[in-house]
Amino acid sequence: MDIRTFDSIALSRVVNGGSPRRREARHCVAFDLTVPGLDSSAARDMLAYAFGAGTQAYIVETSRLRDCTTLHVETDRDDINDVIGTLTAHFPNATLGRVTRITRITRR
C-alpha cells in the first residue's frame, strides 16, 4: 500500500495550477466623507476624478433630517496628508470623518 502525503506548498501548487500564488500588500487610506444632499452620484464622480478610477465609495448613511449622505471611501493613496489636501481642494462643503491607513492583501 502506497500512501503519499503533500505538504501545504505542494498542495497549493496542485490546486492553483502548478505555481504558488503570490501575495502582495497594498497600503491605502480609508475615510468617511459626509457630503450635502441625498444623491451621492456627484460626490462619487468627484472622488473618481480626484483620486482615480480605483477609488471605492460605499454609502454608509443617508440623513433626510440633515440632508446629507455619508460615504466610506477607500483610495489607493497611502499618504494621509495628501488625501486630506485633495479632499479640502475638491470638497469644500464636505465633512471629513475618521481617516485610517489600511493594508490590503491581494493575490496574484
Image: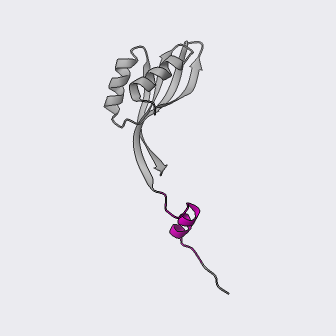
Question: What is the image's colouring?
Answer: one colour
Front position in the image: 82 or 50: 50
- 14 in the magenta segment: yes
Residue numbers of the magenta segment: 5-21
Residue plotted at (53% across, 69% down): 10
* Occupied quadrant, residue 103: top left
Residue 65 to residue 86: above or below = above
Indicate left or right for 63 with 102 as reference.
right
Residue under the image location 58 percent in, 63 percent down: 15
The N terminus sits in image quarter:
bottom right
Residue at image position (41%, 49%) is: 25
> Residue 103 lies in magenta, yes or no?
no
The number of discs equals 0
Q: Residue at x 42, y 29 (%)?
A: 52
Q: Residue furthest bottom?
A: 1
Q: Residue 102: x and y, percent?
A: 43, 41
How far across and how far down the image is residue 64, in percent? 60, 13
